[in-house]
Image (spheres, rainbow, N blue to C red):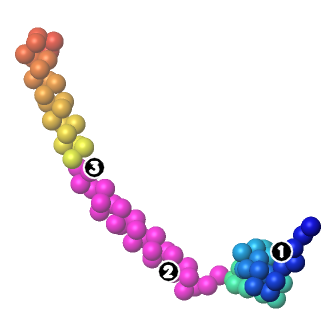
Amino acid sequence: MRRDVNFLQDKLIQINHPEPILDTAKPSELCCNTKQHNIGIAFVNGYDAATGALANLVEFPKRTSNQVGKGITSFLDMIGGRLVGLQK
């Protein structure tokens, strides 16, 4: 036996199980998908440039320390090879 749904339960069901927007959207409700907005393009390009510059700024010390570390390691390898007699 199924119980009847009261008004409050009906509203909760509608809130918790909304209809998909994709299936219910009318062509008149769809907007701005075919136009290129100059302000939006400028914002995205500016944001992309700023995040790229910030990433390079953050990555620079890491790259530098890796290069210095590789140089030190190769120098110590050379000295160790001479001490052991593997290199002249």
Residue 30 figure quarter: bottom right
**Image x and y of residue 50, in percent:** 39, 72
* Residue 86 painted magenta: no
Note whether 83 is above or below 69 in the view shown.
above
Looking at the rendering, in which quadrant would you find the N terminus?
bottom right
Can residue 5 be seen here? yes
The numbered mark at residue 23 is 1
- Reading the image, the residue beneath label 2 is 43
Q: Secondary structure at mark 1?
A: helix
Which residue is rendered at x = 51% and y = 76% of the image?
A: 44
Which callout, 2 or 3, points at the residue further toward the start of the chain?
A: 2
**Image x and y of residue 46, in percent:** 45, 76
The amino acid type of the residue labelled 2 equals Phe
Judge by depth and name the residue closer to the eye, 77 or 14. Answer: 14
Q: Secondary structure at mark 2?
A: helix
Q: What's the distance in space between the residues labelled 2 and 1, CA to CA?
A: 31 Å
The numbered mark at residue 63 is 3
**Image x and y of residue 75, in percent:** 14, 30
